[in-house]
Image (cartoon, rainbow, N blue to C red):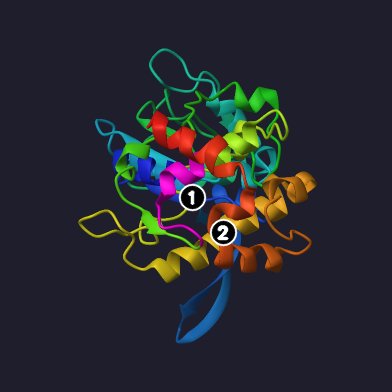
């Protein structure tokens, strides 16, 4: 649905981090780590506090209290957020001014912050061994709950965030007039945006009942894949066909409709993923069944 692009346009100068399954508190916040320092011409191992992205963003917000500082966390649910945030969880409750209601004690973190020349012992944000979040520091996360291998978030963590849902057709108008292509077995021009909505309609039908968060958004295929000429026709049609097979068909076959793939691809041999791809080369959208175009594609096109 273009979540990252939406965030990038709105917060272009933000601090950014992408969570992943191996992400830890020490990666995010920082911790004591061994580093190599040169002393009298020789390398020596020293142990110092190395700041993570959160600590860097906190310092920037403290240094520039009149500016809005944003820390963007991409794929926030691809890591164990309870472990990565740790005691920072306590800071997420904010008062009416935007500052943390509560503080956390962290001697190593506070010592590092107070060694910065711009940081003083200010009772509202930092003390001898405690800190709070500045009101001008915003944390923004992106997530897709349908992705496989993600970590569930507990209710206590989730309710400390405001959620903004991007619908499955968000910003589709940006590509509605492009992405046209002629596929096998038809002289009719097929439009990518109409096709993916028709696929979504079949997934949402009473026969399949696929959840909305598994439907296909307008930017499931990138703009470079559907790049079009002045008539709206896809410039590199071979690249589109390859991407459709390797991204759309594979996603449907191995994930979204995995349990009912033989019924979903009822217009071709669906015993193997490769068989469906071969059939797409021969019959285009006919892989979705003889009635797909009439029941789903034409209806989406007429509604548009």
Q: Quadrant of residue 89?
A: top right
Q: Is residue 196 magenta?
A: yes
In this rendered view, identify the residue nearer to me: 163 or 244: 244
Q: Residue furthest bottom?
A: 41
Which residue shows up at 61% across the image and 52% down it? 26
Q: Is residue 29 above or below residue 42?
A: above
Cβ atoms under marks 1 and 2 closer than 8 Å: yes
At a point 57% along the width and 46% down the height, the residue shown is 108
Left or right? Give the position of 212 relative to 110.
Answer: right
256 relative to 192 in the view: left or right = right
Instruction: Tell me: residue 56, above or below residue 37.
Output: above
Res. 143 in view: no
Helix, strand or loop for disc 1: loop
Q: Nearer the viewer, residue 118 or 3?
A: 3
Q: Which residue is mark 1?
A: 220
Residue furthest to the top in view is 96
Q: CA distance from mark 1 to mark 2?
A: 8 Å
Q: Residue at x 38, y 16 (%)?
A: 97
Q: Is residue 68 left or right of residue 240?
A: left
Q: Position of residue 260 (x, y in %)?
A: 77, 45
The image position of residue 52, as x and y in percent, is 51, 52
Q: Residue at x 51, y 18 (%)?
A: 101
Q: Is residue 124 left or right of residue 248?
A: left
Which residue is the site of mark 2? 247
Q: Quadrant of the C terminus?
A: top left
So how many labels did they put on this image? Answer: 2
Q: Give, as a single range, the part of the protein colored magenta.
A: 185-197
């Amino acid at each position: 649905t273009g979540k990252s692009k939406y965030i990038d346009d709105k917060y272009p100068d933000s601090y950014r981090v992408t969570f992943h399954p191996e992400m830890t508190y020490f990666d995010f916040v920082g911790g004591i780590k061994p580093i190599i320092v040169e002393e009298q011409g020789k390398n020596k191992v020293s142990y110092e506090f190395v700041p993570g992205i959160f600590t860097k963003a906190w310092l920037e917000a403290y240094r520039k209290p009149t500016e809005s500082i944003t820390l963007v966390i991409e794929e926030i649910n691809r890591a164990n957020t309870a472990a990565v945030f740790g005691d920072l969880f306590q800071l997420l409750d904010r008062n009416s001014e935007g500052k943390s209601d509560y503080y956390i004690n962290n001697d190593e973190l506070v010592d590092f912050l107070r060694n910065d020349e711009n940081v003083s012992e200010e009772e509202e944000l930092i003390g001898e061994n405690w800190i709070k979040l500045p009101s001008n520091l915003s944390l923004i996360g992106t997530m897709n709950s349908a992705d496989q291998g993600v970590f569930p978030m507990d209710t206590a963590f989730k309710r400390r965030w405001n959620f903004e849902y991007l619908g499955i057709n968000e910003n589709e108008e940006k590509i509605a007039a492009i992405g046209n292509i002629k596929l096998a077995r038809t002289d009719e021009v097929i439009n990518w945006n109409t096709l993916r909505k028709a696929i979504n309609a079949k997934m949402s039908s009473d026969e399949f009942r696929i959840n909305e968060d598994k439907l296909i958004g307008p930017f499931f295929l990138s703009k470079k894949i559907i790049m079009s000429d002045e008539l709206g026709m896809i410039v590199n049609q071979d690249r589109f066909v390859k991407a459709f097979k390797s991204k759309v068909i594979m996603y449907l076959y191995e994930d979204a409709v995995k349990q009912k793939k033989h019924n979903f691809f009822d217009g071709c041999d669906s015993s193997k993923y490769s068989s469906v791809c071969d059939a797409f080369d021969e019959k285009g959208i006919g892989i979705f069944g003889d009635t797909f175009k009439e029941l789903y594609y034409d209806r989406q096109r007429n509604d548009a």
